Image (spheres, rainbow, N blue to C red):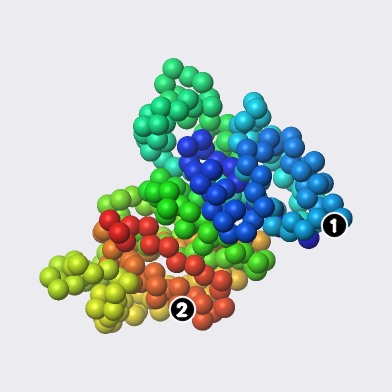
Amino acid sequence: MTDYLLITGMSGAGRSTAAAALEDAGWYVIDNMPPSLLGPAADIVGAPGSEQDRVALVIGRGGGASVEEALPAIEELRSRGDRVRLVFLDAPDEILVRRFEGTRRRHPFSGEKVADAIADERRILDPVRDRADVVLDTGELNVNQLRVRIAELLGDDADPGMRTSVVSFGYKHGVPLDVDLVFDCRFLPNPHWVDELRPFTGLNAPVRDFVLSFDETRQFLDKVDDLLGTLLPAYESEGKSYLTIAMGCTGGRHRSVALAEELARLLAERGAVTTVFHRDVDR
């Protein structure tokens, strides 16, 4: 059985970076794949004697191909019995505009304004986004962070079960677009207002011990853990491949980081395949 990852999404959202990260992680990557060639490419990859069992196909609009044509091709791949997952890279419109204006690249959707071209592309790709197994928000990620996120989430995914990702973030930098569950931990005492703790993050023992020392922290984690004990098997039984849980505090450096690490530990004790990503810890 061949494991296929199909990478697509909004222009400027990081398809090339995702391709490079997967190639570094050992995937056989075919970049800028026209959707009409998905079937023939799968025939070659799956031919007797082929040694490629993990293939990433990066779908773009090269050569005039339309990404929306990919959905029938994806269903055809799935009908063969192979594992096929669709990953959609996205970012807020204002960030995509800045990326195109900053690089002076021409948007694949021609138009007088970049914003109009992005709106047209989003309208056409909405059905693809709705069918994706993973929607990854790249808006607040630099190139290195995106590579790490891709590698952690998809790079070494031999387990066919549901993968769980815990993300920490700061509300002042915006709520991630790609999360399934969001928990607000701003009600907890803030280490930022403790002079000796402010320079550290939730990855450091002094901050972690401070955050976890409060009764309300333990009560909160116990209730979240209990809730996930019910939700995880339910999501998995419904065929969900990825679950992303976000912990948010004000700046994304202290409380959310410590709680994300602790929640990941609790999930691992439940046997969940779990990764942790701290989006704003270095801000």
Q: Position of residue 66 (x, y in %)?
A: 64, 31
Q: Is residue 112 left or right of residue 189?
A: right
When asked about the image quadrant of residue 95, the answer is: top left
Look at 74% across and 35% down and name the residue there.
Answer: 36
Q: Which residue is mark 2?
A: 266
Examine the rendered structure and indicate whether residue 205 appears above or below residue 99.
Answer: below
Q: Is residue 246 above or below residue 18?
A: below
- Amino acid of disc 1: Gly
Q: In what element is the residue under mark 2?
A: helix
Disc 2 and disc 1: Cα gap in Å? 43 Å
For mark 2, does the 10 Å Cα neighbourhood hold few (<14), some (14 to 19), or many (20 or more) residues? some
Foreground tag (2 vs 1)? 1
Going from the N terminus, do you reach mark 2 or mark 1 first? 1
Res. 49 mark: 1
Nearest to the observer: residue 17 or residue 219: 17
Instruction: Residue at 43%, 48% (x, y): give it.
Output: 143
Q: Is residue 129 visible?
A: no
